[in-house]
Structures are given as C-alpha cells and as structure tokens.
Amino acid sequence: MSIISERTQAPSLAVESFAGTLDVLSRILPARLLKPRVAIVCGSGLSTLASSLRDVVEVPYSSLQGFGKSTVEGHRSALAFGLTGEGDGIPVVAMLGRFHPYEGHSLSTVVYPIRVLARLGVRDIIITNAAGSLNPNLDVGTIVSIQDHLALPNLTGFHPLLGPTRPNYPRFLPLSTAYSRPLRRLVFLAAHALRLPRDALAEGTYAWVSGPSYETPAEGRFLSAAGADVVGMSTVPEVLAAREEGINVCVLSLVTNKVVIPEYKSVREEVQAELAGKAIERAPEAEVSHEEVLSVGKQKAEVMKSLVAKLIELIAAEQEK
Ligand SMILES: O=P(O)(O)O[C@@H]1C[C@H](O)[C@@H](CO)O1
C-alpha cells in the first residue's frame, strides 16, 4: 500500500471507536483506577517499569477494540492500571508494550492507545524507549531526557496526523514546545532526589526512523550531522498524538547500544599491504542486535523504574498545586 493511499484512507477515523473501549474499561476497573493521572509507555525490554505499581489490574489489548497486538520481543500486549506512591496512591496506567509501524500496524493503530489514554483523563505521559547513541558522549546505559526530535518520516509524508480536518483538533500542530519543559525539569529533580550520578541522565534529540533495519554507518553519520543524539523506531507518532490530544509529554530514552559509525579503512590498502607481506591492521567489525538492546534494558530496569516512580510523585505533586 502506498503512503498516499494509506493516509487518504484515514484509518484513524475508522478505529476511533472509543466508546466501546472505554465501556470495557469502565466495567473491568475499580473506580479508583479508572481515572489515571499519569501514563507510562514502556519501551523495548522496559515493561518492568510498571512493576512498582500496586493493586494492579491488567487489561489485555485483545479485549480492547481498536488495539493491535505487540509482536516485538520485550513488549507485552496489555495495559496495567495501578497505584504508586504513599497513602491512597496515585492512579497510573502503563502500556506494557507498544505498536511500531514496522510491525505492519498503521500509524492510526500505533497512536490509538494514546487517544484512549487522553479520554481516560491522562494529563501527563512518560514515554520510554530503547535507542541507539549517535553522540560519542552518550554511553550505553545513559538515560536521555528528550528535548526535541528529528522525524524524517514525518517530513516526507509518513505522519500520524494526516487526514481530514476534525472538529476540536488543531489542523496545524505546533511542535516547538512538544517536550514539556516543566516535565523535563521534574526529570532532573527526580534524578537529584534519587542521587543518581551526574552522567546517568543526559538531554538530547531523538531521531525517529521507521526501522526495522538498524542504521547503516552512513545513515548514522547523517542523523548525527543533522543534530540527533539518539535514534529509535518509535515514540514520535505517540508524541504527536499526545500533543494533539493536549497531553503534556516527557520522553526518556535508554541508550542500549552505540550506533556503529566506524572510520572506513580502505580495503584496497589492506589488500595491497597483504600482497606486499606487510602486517595488516584490520578494522574491527561490530553489529547491533535486539538481544543486546533487551539485555541493556534488563540491566537498567531498576534505575529506570525508580526514576519513573519518583517522577510520577513529582508530577502528581505539581498537578495538585
Ligand atoms: O519500542 P522501542 O522504541 O523501545 O524499541 C526499540 C526500537 C525497535 O523497536 C527495537 C530495536 O531493537 O527497540
């Protein structure tokens, strides 16, 4: 299906059967969980972010009209509703897995859960992802608070907000303040409260690529030269839908690998040296894998979890002001 036909079909309008989804949730959930104040989207290998919630009710995506199925390892197909924090607790909802366009999901399916969260009353969302580092200063294991994005698919016509003008939605969504500065401030305050080392948390720009291949070295150089610090295959469509719905957005990327950007060593010179009987210094070759991505997610699960839990506490305190 061409990009044009997908967008003009406007499947977003076809799947927006919110009433059915909300009806199922209102029948399953106790009243104290039905109005989550904060939402979390769990990235690859990060579904344990929801394990700090208590009184959890999990709702499988298969029971929710309009939801797809997460088919990528490290993603679960369920919403988890629960409480965090002291006392009565703060109601939170977590997407334990997300949908990526490369799985074959339409962009409208990818963002549908975000629109449902908005209708449940979510005002602030913490979107997480696993990402590759394009910036030599960002090592594996660093958490990056995203301040901006670079989305080549959006700039070239693959955009989740394409479609007919709808009442009560902005036709032209501004994105200069898409990544909430107040929430980004709270991220650093949360890290401070947890006494995380200074280099555990950085700020940067996320490049969205469609995947599912990882970047070639030339693509890595290109994205880096264009100003991106990390690269991944998700998040941006969710950010756009959340902003369109009026939700404040915070994005945390976990650096799971370095994007391989080797210095090219001439094979011709290598062969010439070999033929001349000279010692050869071979350039090391490296490849990234999803297993590596998941393994770093596992190693960093605890720190991500405590950062997100503290951030939710701070967000809830701000909401009460
Ligand atoms: O869902 P996220 O963005 O966390 O997952 C990343 C991007 C690809 O889906 C996958 C590649 O390893 O991890």
Image (cartoon, rainbow, N blue to C red):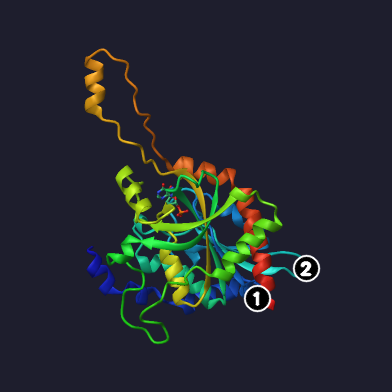
| Residue 96 pos. (x, y %) | 54, 58
| Residue 59 pos. (x, y %) | 56, 64
Q: Nearer the viewer, residue 58 or 4?
A: 4
Residue 244 in sight in this render: yes
User: Helix or strand or loop: what does disc 2 sit on?
Assistant: loop
- Between tags 2 and 1, which lies in front? 1
Image quarter in which the C terminus is found: bottom right
> Relative to 292, is 286 on the left or the right?
left
Vertical comparison of 134 with 166: above or below = above
Image quarter in which the N terminus is found: bottom left
Find the residue positioned furthest to the right. Answer: 87
Name which residue lies at 33% across and 68% down. 159
Instruction: Give the labeled residue for mark 1.
Output: 319
> Marks 2/1: CA distance?
17 Å
Instruction: Give the labeled residue for mark 2.
Output: 87
| Residue 260 pos. (x, y %) | 38, 40
Dot 1: within a 10 Å radius of its alpha carbon, few (fewer than 14), some, or many (20 or more) residues? Answer: few
User: Helix or strand or loop: what does disc 1 sit on?
Assistant: helix
Under mark 2, the amino acid is Gly
Q: Nearer the viewer, residue 274 or 309?
A: 274
Would the CB of label 1 be found within 8 Å of ligand 1? no
